[in-house]
Amino acid sequence: MQVPHQAFVVVADGRKMLFLRNDGDEEYPNLQVERVREQDNPPDRVQSTDAPGSTFSSVGNGRSSYEETDFHQLEEDRFAAQTAELLKKRAFNNDFEALVVIAPPQTLGELRKNYHKEVESRLIGELDKDLTGHSIADIEKALMRAD
C-alpha cells in the first residue's frame, strides 16, 4: 500500500492506539509516533460478577436464559468509538489529508460504524491486522507488503 508523505496512520485494537505520521515517501514509509494511548481492560472473567440470568416461563416448562454481557468486548468497542471520535476532531482540525487505518477485523468494524463523513473522505486505505504490539519497522513492512 502506498502511503503518501505526511499521511496519518492509525494502528489500533480495543485497548491501544498509535497515531503515526509518515515522514517518508509513498514507497518507503518512515513512520513517526505522534501519540500513544493505552487503556487497561481486564478480561471479562475479572469484570463479570454473576452467572448469566435465566427466566422461567409460566406457560409450558420453558426456561430461557440470558447471554452474559461481555464487559471486556463492550470496553473494546467503546475504545474504538473513542478512537473514531479523536479522528473526527483531528480531521476537523485539518491535521491530516490522507488516513490509513490498521486494526484487527472486530476493531475495524467498530471504527467503521463510528467514522464521521469527514474521516471517511480522507481514508485512503485499511489493513485488517492486529499490529499494535509490533515495532514501527514491522508496521512499515506490513504497509509496504499490503495491496
Image (tube, grey):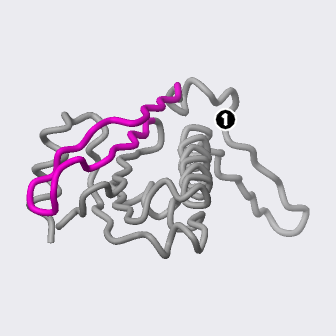
Disc 1, SS: loop
Instruction: Examine the rendered structure and indicate whether residue 92 appears above or below residue 133.
Output: below
Closer-to-camera residue (54/127): 127
Q: Is residue 35 magenta?
A: yes
Q: Quadrant of residue 91?
A: bottom right
Q: Quadrant of residue 73?
A: top right
Q: Is residue 64 left or right of residue 130?
A: right
Quadrant where the C terminus sits is bottom left
Q: Is residue 128 magenta?
A: no
**Residue positioned 36% across, 58% down in the render:** 101
Instruction: Examine the rendered structure and indicate whether residue 11 appears above or below residue 91.
Output: above
**Residue positioned 42% across, 65% down in the render:** 97
Question: How would you rate the neighbour count of disc 1 (Cα within 10 Å): few for under 14, some for 14-19, many for 20 or more?
Answer: few
Residue 47 in the image: state x and y as whole percent: 62, 27
**Residue positioned 62% across, 39% down in the render:** 71
Quadrant where the N terminus sits is bottom left
Residue 77 in the image: state x and y as whole percent: 57, 50
Q: Is residue 69 left or right of residue 108?
A: right
Q: Amino acid at mark 1?
A: Ala
Q: Quadrant of residue 123?
A: bottom left
Which residue is identified by label 1?
A: 51
Q: Main secondary structure of the magenta part?
A: strand
Residue 80 in the image: state x and y as whole percent: 53, 50
Magenta span: 16-40
Closer-to-camera residue (30/72): 30
